[in-house]
Amino acid sequence: MKKRTPNSGKSNLSPFKKFIKEKPKRETFSEKPAPRRKPSKKLEEKLKAKKDQKIRETVYGSSDKEIKKPIYDVKKVISVAKKVREESEEVKAKRTNEVRLNKYISNAGVCSRREADKLIAEGLVKINGEVVTEMGYKVQPNDRVEYEGKLLKKEQYVYVLLNKPRGFITTTKDPLERKTVMQLVQNACEERIYPVGRLDRNTTGLLLFTNDGEFATKVAHPSSNTQKIYRVELDQPLKEEDEMTLRDRKFELEDGSPYIDGLSVNEDDRREIGIELHSGKNRIVRRIFEHFGYTVEVLDRTVLAGLTKKDLPRGKWRYLSEQEMISLKYLSGLDKKKKKPAKESKAKRRR
């Protein structure tokens, strides 16, 4: 019998290797899974119904299978809403007529609000015959407010325009007993008026006085864009490159860049300049020119919110006319009407 050698026969593979060789290759699968089929409409409805049923059982209990919509009495709802609206309007009207006690005393021309707080704390103010020391107390329209036995009433608003001369400081009181602008308007009225904004001691020109606090705040605030025009005289001619920088507003001061609305230069000697701006910052005009190395020798405010010095000599004052007050309040935003919504205006145009 012949012995088989390792190389004899058709194949020298072991059964395991033979199995591997003869085993068919597996089918290859794509990396992305096959898209799932969307459930049918009936199946979606069933799933939604089951979900709603679970919510009902957890919130309302298993016994409440059906949720009934509440039935409203429309007329009753409208009447209640109307009543609530009327009550809220009444409360709002009462609140608008209420005035803080220190403001009421200030409006009566007795003193400032800070000084009024001291009078209240000292028990010198009576309301309806009783002493009131509460700082935040609000005076009702029918309350009687008394100070030193005198009945206080709200003052009538007064508006005075002064052409300020040199040498007077813009303040109501000065501890150093220097001349103040209040000495120039002391005979203008019995009401307690105060200056709106300020002018330096050596600055001349228009200065407004009033006892209308809301109006004064609006006019003095930068958001009202109150027009101010000054006539400036420098110690030396203004250079052309400095003029271009001023016109282009490409400079900044220590408190930011001032917005210059207009600039005009007298070409004869270039020392006399007109400048328009609405900023109310302290010494703003002087600081602008000092930034470029100039000294302001003369500074005069010639226009203030459309008001001019026409027929008003230096050191004299006058009352504002009714037309001037209308235009001033309009410019400051006190008399501006609320704009109607865009939808209403478009609807009217279509009609």
Image (spheres, grey):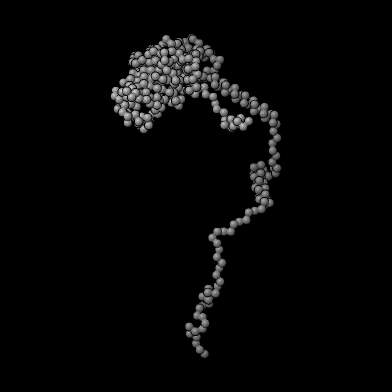
Q: Residue 103: horizontal and vertical position, in percent?
A: 48, 18
80 relative position to 255: left or right: right
- Could you say which quadrant of the image residue 270 lies in? top left
Q: Can the viewer see residue 65 in this picture? A: yes
**Residue depicted at x 39% and y 13%:** 313
Q: Residue 323: horizontal and vertical position, in percent?
A: 49, 16
64 relative position to 245: left or right: right
- Toward the viewer: 251 or 75? 251
Query: Relative to 302, does residue 189 appear above or below in the rendering?
Result: above
- Could you say which quadrant of the image residue 196 lies in? top left
Query: Relative to 340, does residue 315 appear above or below in the rendering?
Result: above
Query: Relative to 198, does residue 53 appear above or below in the rendering?
Result: below
Query: Relative to 54, does residue 88 appear above or below in the rendering?
Result: above
- Toward the viewer: 112 or 290? 290
Q: Residue 172: horizontal and vertical position, in percent?
A: 39, 16
70 relative position to 257: left or right: right
Furthest toward the front, the residue is 268
Where the C terminus falls, by quadrant? Answer: top right
Q: Can the viewer see residue 119 in this picture? A: no
Q: Residue 7: horizontal and vertical position, in percent?
A: 48, 83
